[in-house]
Image (cartoon, rainbow, N blue to C red):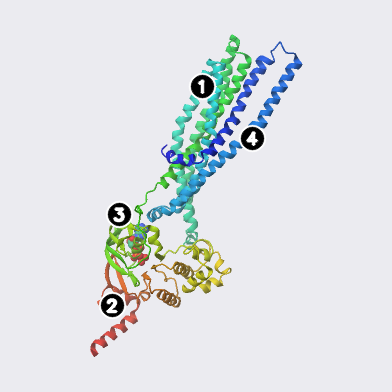
Amino acid sequence: MSAFRPFIPYVMKEKQLYLWGFVGSVFRFLIPLFVPLAVKYVFDELLQSHALSVPEKAERLLLIAALLLLVCFLIRAPMEYVRQYFTHKANNNVIKALRQDVFSKVHSLDPKYLADNKSGEIGARFFDDIEKIRGLMMAVLSNIWIELLVLFFIISVMLALNVRLTLVSVLLVGIQFALAHLLSRRLKRATSQMMNYRSLLSGFVLEKIQGAIVSKWFLSEKRDREELDRHLDRYGKLTDKQVGIHAVSLAAVNVLNDVTPFMVVFVGSFSVLDGNLTLGSLMAFFAYVDRMRSPVTALVQAFPAIAEGNVALQRVFDFLNTPSTVIERDRPVELKSFTESIRFRQVSFSYNGRDDAIKNVSFTLEKGKTYAFVGESGGGKSTILQLLTRMYDADRGEILIDGVSIKDYSISSLRRQMGIVAQDHFLYSSSVRDNLMIAKLDATDEEVADAAKKAFAHDFIRSLPKGYDTEIGERGVKLSGGQKQRIALARVFLKDPAIILLDEATSALDNESEKLVQASIRRMQRDKTIIMIAHRLSTVLTADTIFVMKNGEIIESGDHRSLLELGGYYKELYAKQNPAATEAEGAARMRARASG
Ligand SMILES: Nc1ncnc2c1ncn2[C@@H]1O[C@H](COP(=O)(O)OP(=O)(O)OP(=O)(O)O)[C@@H](O)[C@H]1O
């Protein structure tokens, strides 16, 4: 029930449309309910009247028929349209608002949530769950409430006709409701298991589609298929369970449904024999009891949709209420421009709450200089960038920009100062131009081309079939690794931020291209602060300061020369990558010492 509360504002926003739907429904459903009363009049009064001649009776019959037809065509039919149109429109608006909110929520989720949950499972909220909420709205807002109103109306008229018969009917219908209610709890539980599994299944399938090429390489298609079969079997069992419970509800309700009119005729016939009930009243009664079955059947038939919608509401609002750990403070400061320094003060951070990815790290970076982080894989280099861009917040210590904690800045103004080429430089399945322009939405063609030239991407882009308008496929599959990297670099050149973060930004380029791109980066350097991460030490030789990381700690720092002279871990790494250069440098130093 709890998920209904946050859902109410969505429905209330559309109350005007629902009101029209309500008006349409009342007319559409209540008009036919007067037909049995007309039948009663025809049987009890008109046909048995001694005051009227046969032609007069025929004339009245025709008049009643014409009146009923007229009401049906002129009021009931248009009201059906009003009911359908406005209720569906209102439902569509609610669905649209929910989808907008789910989509916006994706952007405010912590990277940790995105790392812990498969995109297919998150996508299931957007598609499957919200569609189930539509089913719930159709059942409840379009049908069930009006059926209940009809039930109330019918019982009132029946009470006026005959109390005893009404009690028999209400008792029988009451038993049907009680049965249905009893089974609905089990149905909800089964539905919840089924839907949670369905979202897991969509996560699995999406991941396998994305990894289809890897499956081909490693010939793991058969294993994927077996895994899918296992998932489908389990899902099949859960759907069978749900269908089974629903079938039991329908069977129980339908038996009683069949029995009810018969019982009414049976009991009612005695009343007719006793002279307590007219034949016309019994016929009207029979028609009402028949109509009375419809709300119960509608309710029971809608149970799966209601149960699924209920679970979907819970899942969607649980998702919308996912707390964020990276939170902007009230009235944050705008970081208008970066003017002095970035400072990490005794910063520690763990992704899983157990192992520190960064341990007590402190350093200061000055504006306009180039810094590099090098060291072993998994040493914590990328984590430094994650913390600086506030994808995660440090567990301990402080990160300051121009002397102010980054938590005090608005997140957008902080990120506006930074441009990043990450290891996983995601490209969208749109054109090259669109991919570049996410860095600057109002960029001119010249600015786009200029940025591409700096990243040495312009020539290859122009050679693509439609140049800058070429579609590059999902995640840029139609491009080579180096081409994708150049586009990611061009994106940062186009953004032209004060702080440039390069995480293995040139690793996919050949030596020649890497040198050219590095030169571009250096050219834009003047007032830029560059933080680069690289395994290939040849790319960081000119950095003002190189930080060497191991096990989440900075173990050495200095420029290339001083680090070599230190003779520590950096020298070891450098020697491994450049054996010849190290020997030559050693010999030169020896010579210098001998001559000095
Ligand atoms: N999203 C994440 N969730 C959990 N653990 C993570 C996550 N990202 C990184 N780690 C862990 O944190 C540690 C530091 O990772 P980080 O990516 O900072 O290393 P790195 O020095 O950049 O490595 P590489 O040079 O291989 O890119 C590693 O042990 C890694 O397994």
- Looking at this view, is 276 or 435 the one in front? 435
Mark in front: 3 vs 4: 4
Distance from the alpha carbon under mark 1 to that under mark 4 = 32 Å
Q: Earlier in the sequence, mark 1 or mark 4?
A: 4
User: For the residue marked with disc 4, what is the amino acid?
Assistant: Pro
Q: Residues within 10 Å of mark 2 (few under 14, many from 20)?
A: many
User: For the residue marked with disc 2, what is the amino acid?
Assistant: Leu
Q: Are marks 3 and 1 in contact (CB under 8 Å)?
A: no
- Looking at this view, is 14 or 307 the one in front? 14
Q: Secondary structure at mark 4?
A: helix
Find disc 2 in the rendering and name its residue. 564
Q: Secondary structure at mark 3?
A: loop
Q: Residues within 10 Å of mark 4 (few under 14, many from 20)?
A: some
Q: Residues within 10 Å of mark 3 (few under 14, many from 20)?
A: few
State the residue at coordinates (35%, 78%).
578
Distance from the alpha carbon under mark 2 to that under mark 1 = 93 Å
User: For the residue marked with disc 1, what is the amino acid?
Assistant: Val
Q: Are marks 3 and 4 in contact (CB under 8 Å)?
A: no
Which label number is shown at residue 353?
Answer: 3
Q: Earlier in the sequence, mark 3 or mark 4?
A: 4
Distance from the alpha carbon under mark 3 to that under mark 4 = 63 Å
Report if residue 585 is visible in the image.
yes
Find disc 4 in the rendering and name its residue. 78
From this view, report whether residue 134 is shown above or below residue 26. Answer: below
Distance from the alpha carbon under mark 2 to that under mark 4 = 87 Å
Find disc 1 in the rendering and name its residue. 170
